[in-house]
Image: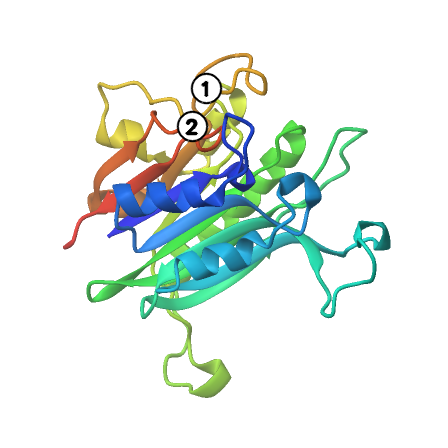
Amino acid sequence: MQIFSWNIQNGKGCDGIIDLQNIVNFIKANCEPEVICLQEVARHFAEHGDQDQLAFLETAFDDYSCVWAPGFSWPQSPAQFDSKPPSKELRQEFGNLVLVKKGLLLDYKVHTLPSPAAHGLMQMPRTAVEVVVAHQQSAIRIISSHLAFHSYDERIAQLDYLTALKDLAHARSLHPANDQKTGCYRPAPSPQGTFLCGDLNVALGESDYQHIINSGWVDVWPTLYPDKEHLPTCGIYDHQQWPQGAHCRDYFLCSSDVTAQLECMQVDIQSAASDHQPIWLTLKNTF
């Protein structure tokens, strides 16, 4: 199984041109993921191409089930209409999209992440998508998210929320619910382990990265490649947004009980279709 993750910056390449087809072409040409996790997908924003990117991606990947998690949903301002309002309501949304090959999605939840007071800092509502996906004769849990950039305290609160999801999944595996019930009380599929991916806005070597490790998460890259430095996932081509240059802030993490499932992780450092680089993880077929 392959899990793909990419902060696509609403399709804006490092040349400043918004072209979602570049994103689609890359994914289809380079891997065959069962799960595609995309961050920074926009709907009906003039500054982000004034298109429904959710609809575009749903059409491009029509053999996938779609789980959409906008951080907000705002009505368009009348000033944005050229003449009269459109026949159906178009809402401005921005968030995370997870696509799962049809037939594999067993369950999903959309989480609104903590948003503590930002003390004058810029702030955007953030979400996480949690999907449970069939794999072989079992299932895996995958969480995709895009964490706060401007506020360290906000980012730590969001990391702690995601850690709580991981720990809860482990506790439920040790103390399962009554499985004799039916209907709404029938227990949802709840595998023990958890994978977390996305743009976490955490740089290697910073205190929030150490907070991740101290919270029981395993960083997949050094686990698979202990003698190799993390490849950069950001700042390779866009030096205006990232004057510090190439560095890593996009990750695959997992709980310690699923490390035996890891096979390989790839980072493409050639694509300039976004300011971030695509990453993907391959899990073993048997475990």
* Furthest residue in direction right, as rendered: 79
Residue depicted at 38% across the width and 39% down the height: 253
Is label 1 in a helix, a strand or a loop? loop
* Furthest residue in direction left, as rendered: 286
Residue 123: percent from left, percent from top: 72, 36
* Furthest residue in direction top, as rendered: 244
Q: Earlier in the sequence, mark 1 or mark 2?
A: 1
In contact (CB < 8 Å): disc 1 and disc 2: yes
Give amino acid for label 2: Ala
Residue 235: percent from left, percent from top: 48, 20
| Residue in front for this viewpoint, 30 or 117 | 30
Q: Which residue is mark 2?
A: 272
Residue depicted at 29% across the width and 51% down the height: 33
Q: Is residue 280 left or right of residue 143?
A: left
Give amino acid for label 1: Tyr
**Label 1 Cα neighbours within 10 Å, binned few <14 / some 14-19 / many ≥20:** many
Quick check: 111 above or below 217? below
Q: Which residue is mark 1?
A: 237
Cα distance between the residues tagged 1 and 2: 7 Å
Q: Is residue 89 left or right of residue 157?
A: right
Residue depicted at 49% across the width and 23% down the height: 203
